[in-house]
Structures are given as C-alpha cells and as structure tokens.
Amino acid sequence: MHLAPLTTFSSKKEAVYASLRTAIFQGEFQPGERLVIDTLAKTLGVSAIPVREALQLLQADGLVDIKPHVGASVTTINPDMIYEVFKPFPSLLSSGCSISSLLDLAQPVAQHHMRTSRPIGW
C-alpha cells in the first residue's frame, strides 16, 4: 500500500480523506479490500480518530462501505452504480451541458474502474 504523504490541510480528517480518496481512485486499494483503521493511522502518522472520520466521509461519497462489527472496505463497482452515474447524461446534454464537462464528471469513476482488476460483470 502506497499512500500519498499528508500535506497542509485545515484538519487531519481532511488530509486523511484526501489521501485515501486519491489512493482509491489510483487503484492502491482494490474493490472489496478491507481498510483497517489502525493500519491506515500508523501508515499516515495520525491517530485512529481522523481515519475513522475520513472513512465516514468516503462512505458518504459512496467509495467505502462500513459494516458494524466488521469494518470498512472499498466499495465494489457494479453495473447499477455505473448506470446511476450515466443516467442523467442525456438530460444534461439536452440542457446544453457540454460533452467535455460530462466527461470530466465521469472521469473519476472510469479511472477507478480501469485500474481495478475485476470486471464489472457485463
């Protein structure tokens, strides 16, 4: 596991969030991979509290699943998730939104999918 070093942020939670989010999008963590709070805290040089808070933010973003008494893991990508991302595109295009701006919105999802070794089941 290679996490980016923490840089200047207004809080440790934000720094951990940014580092983990980047690592997920860059494929450092595979879909379904467990994210152990103590290990992440030690790697990032912070206590468990900002890691726990960052994981909750990542869960709100849909990038992490947190199960009580089990822990956190990277969300797996499935066809329904991809459909949900692309479903609004036709109406956005008809409202005058440019294709390049739509591609900018979809890029993080596409990058995450391309870097994972598991097919999405199509």
Image (cartoon, rainbow, N blue to C red):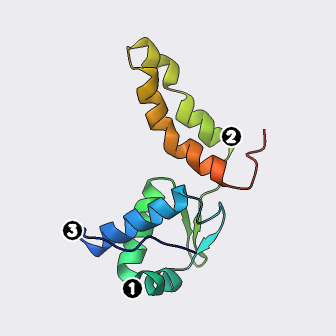
For the residues bearing labels 2 and 1, Cβ distance under 8 angstroms: no
Q: CA distance from mark 2 to mark 1?
A: 36 Å
The type of residue carrying mark 2 is: Pro
Question: Is 120 placed above or below 8 here?
Answer: above
Q: Secondary structure at mark 2?
A: helix
Compare residues 38 and 65 and report the one nearer the observer.
38
Residue at (38, 14) in percent of width and height: 96
How far apart, in angstroms, are the residues tagged by discs 2 and 3? 36 Å
Rendered image: mark on residue 10: 3
In the rendered image, the quadrant that contains the N terminus is bottom right
Looking at the image, is mark 2 or mark 3 earlier in the sequence? 3
Q: Which mark is residue 79?
A: 2
Query: From the viewer's perspective, is the residue at label 2 or at label 3 nearer?
Result: 3
Tell which of 81 and 11 is nearer to you. Answer: 11
Which residue is depicted at the point 60% across and 66% down? 29
The residue singled out by tag 1 in the image is 45
Q: In the structure shown, which secondary structural element does the residue marked by tag 3 occupy?
A: loop
Which x, y percent locates residue 39? Answer: 52, 84
